[in-house]
Amino acid sequence: MKREQKNTFAKTAMMSAISMAVSASAVADASLVLEEVIVTAQKREQSLQEVPVSVSAVSGEQISSSGIKDLTSLSSYVPNLKINEGPTENGIYIRGLGSGENQGFEQSVGMFVDGVYAGKARQFQAPFLDVGSVEVLRGPQGTLYGKNTIAGSITITSARPTDELEASIMTEYEFEEGGQTTEAIVSGPLAENLAGRIALRYTEADGFMDNTLQDDEEMDTNALAGRVSLLWTPTDELDVLFKYESGNTETAGKNNRIIDAGPYLAAYQAFDPNFEVDEYQRSTSDAETMDIDSESFTLNVSYDLGSHELTSITAYSTFEADDVFDADFSPADVISVKLNQEYEQVSQEFRITSELGDKFDYIAGVYYQSSEFDTNRLLGAGAALAALAADPVLSGAGYTGALATTTGFNSQFSQDSETYAVFGSLSWHPTDDMHWTLGLRYSKEDKEAERSLLISEYLGTSAQTDPAAILDMNILGIFSHDVEGNHTDENLSPSLKFQYDVNSDVMLYASLSKAYKSGGYSEPGTTGDELGEYNPIVGAPTTFDFDQEEALAFEVGGKTTLLDGAAVLNFALFRTEYDDLQVSTYDGISFVVGNAAKAISQGIEIDGMVRLSESLTMTGSMSYLDATYDEFANANCTYAQNLVTPVGCTQDLGGETLANAPEWTANLAFDHVMALSDNLELMSHIDFSYTDDQYLASDLDERSLQDDYTLVNARVALSNSEGNWEVALLGKNLTDEEYFTMGGDAGFQDGAFFAFSGAPRTVAIQVKLSM
């Protein structure tokens, strides 16, 4: 592996930050003091430098100046955070831990939008519309945030209505692909004690992938999202915030492509003479589409009782998504999939928070959530599957190539879930410098699920009647079945933190915590789970249910303020041990879920900021990560391993690295403000983000090994001193690095391999008018 030959950027980024901070110490004065960053990582407003948690905070202003538009863009600016796109879901990883893709479960990194847990990534279509702040908490957050925060949490807070009238409109045009985005915001008073805010965004883009068979630029996107917020403050003690959000996203195509044709290059070119394994070029037999509609309602009520604050968060959210995707990722008509998803969630949280006391303070609350999730998956096995019968694994299993052209299956999945939780956190301050915090959360979750699969006609719901077609599907490992299950998870998630204030500028902390991720049921699957039900040569039961996973985390860290307030430097050393880790692996048909026995994630994170002058600020971060499977005896095999053992192959990944876990990551950014005249101001931003080599597929196929790369982004903006207008030039991936974010085996074409491409260089102009 390349890990022995490291790119020097990761190791020099923070060293340059430290050396520049030291050189600036001689000129540090009051005018260089950094603004205090306020976070809500512990469910109350506190200074970032006083919170004993490894957390990165990104303000709405930073999101705008850095050109961050979505979660995938955010991951370049936060240590040990990776977010990638999959065929139908985003994968979110913190410190190498995440769930991958499977519609049947939630991510191991919990996402919260305005205090509401998002069990599915598609609940909120535009979380970065009119953002107030984003906080990324690394490591298990089971006590205050609850289930499914076993690797960390992402908290997004929308901008609130304002007491004074303000309005803005921003339009952006991207030169390379012709994409355009328009965003409009109006906020201000509506009546006495009542303020409102409206935010709208419309985006259209052609995409950067050239689909030679569909003769189209992909992924073509049209998205509309809107949010209405009302803030009612009838008294100084009562604060009522209502929010309604709705969004629709329609796309044509994907940004994945075949990166290794294996033995099928000639076959692919027979279907598409223009097929090539080339950057930003793809070819699919299906015209892929995605259509998502979502809406949500949130009511947040806060009441000040003097020494206590009562908080109630009531939320309802729903989405419906229709996907058509080419599951073989190639021009051959092998596997086509239509997937419909419907999700509905209701949640309620009550919380009481005491004021910070001399000796004791606390937070306590209760939480309830119910959800319903339904999918309808149609798969069509096309005529090309027979033409590709030379596949060594298929022929080794007895496949004859006699596949009927009107064959497929219809799989339906339904899951109902209810969650109850009681939580609390008690802090004791025996001295002014010493602080202990004990937290505990009890959770109970009930789940019921069922899945049925019917071998059917091509992309249809009618039962297949041709015995030969049924036999061919059986040989491919697909069997009609009905499975159902129900179970209850109960868990206690304790935490203990110790914080010591060395002085007003140095804080050290240590923490010990446990967290869990609930078990559940696998939405995709081509067989039931009964032993002996299938032909032992070609069919094997797949797991319908999977167990909860648990984590035990240790962390020590420190937060320091340097140069009389002109710089901050924070660090964290961590080790997290995971039991029964839930792993989603793509097997060429679907993402199969299993519980890896054990995994360990450990490392160090450093981040800092220094104001070098009144006009120049530098921000840097660096992380080292060692994330490995401690035990994983029955992992899916790679293509090369399947050639040796065509049937029943497994591999032992004990001691091997986790996928999506680069050893080194680093970020370095500079922000400069310069007055050109009494009325004109020039603002410039440039950042460099380095990602070490990493595997993109959970089976650690060598073809999924992504080399290390560095992305360079920049923004230059001209505005008037009153802030009434701004014109900016924005560049992303300026060095035009080609890199991949996720990969796997192409369906039923062992030897072929696909991957999702990151965006190439883009250059855009932004114009913003404000009042």
Image (cartoon, rainbow, N blue to C red):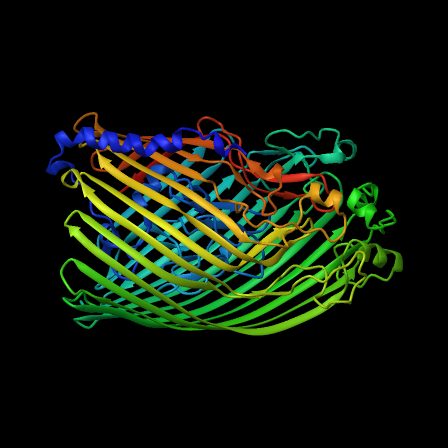
- The answer to which image quadrant residue 618 occupies is top left
Which part of the image, by quadrant, shows the C terminus? Answer: top left
Q: Residue 54: horizontal and vertical position, in percent? A: 33, 51
Which part of the image, by quadrant, shows the N terminus? Answer: top right
User: Total of numbered circles in the picture?
Assistant: 0
> Looking at this view, is 591 or 582 the one in front?
582
Question: Does residue 517 appear left or right of residue 450 in this picture?
Answer: left
Q: Can residue 489 be seen in this view?
A: yes
In the picture shown, does residue 135 fall above or below 725? below
Residue at coordinates 43% horizontally, 38% vertically from top-left?
Answer: 664
Q: Residue 457: horizontal and vertical position, in percent? A: 80, 57
Q: Residue 4: horizontal and vertical position, in percent? A: 48, 32
In the picture shown, does residue 617 fall above or below 645? above
> Looking at this view, is 561 or 640 the one in front?
640
Question: Does residue 155 appear left or right of residue 470 in this picture?
Answer: left
In the picture shown, does residue 317 fall above or below 567? below
Q: Is residue 728 visible?
A: no
Question: Does residue 637 appear left or right of residue 189 in this picture?
Answer: right
- The answer to which image quadrant residue 234 occupies is bottom left
Residue at coordinates 26% horizontally, 61% vertically from top-left?
Answer: 44
- The answer to which image quadrant residue 145 occupies is bottom left
In the picture shown, does residue 739 fall above or below 128? above
> Looking at this view, is 242 or 668 the one in front?
668
Q: Residue 274: horizontal and vertical position, in percent? A: 71, 28
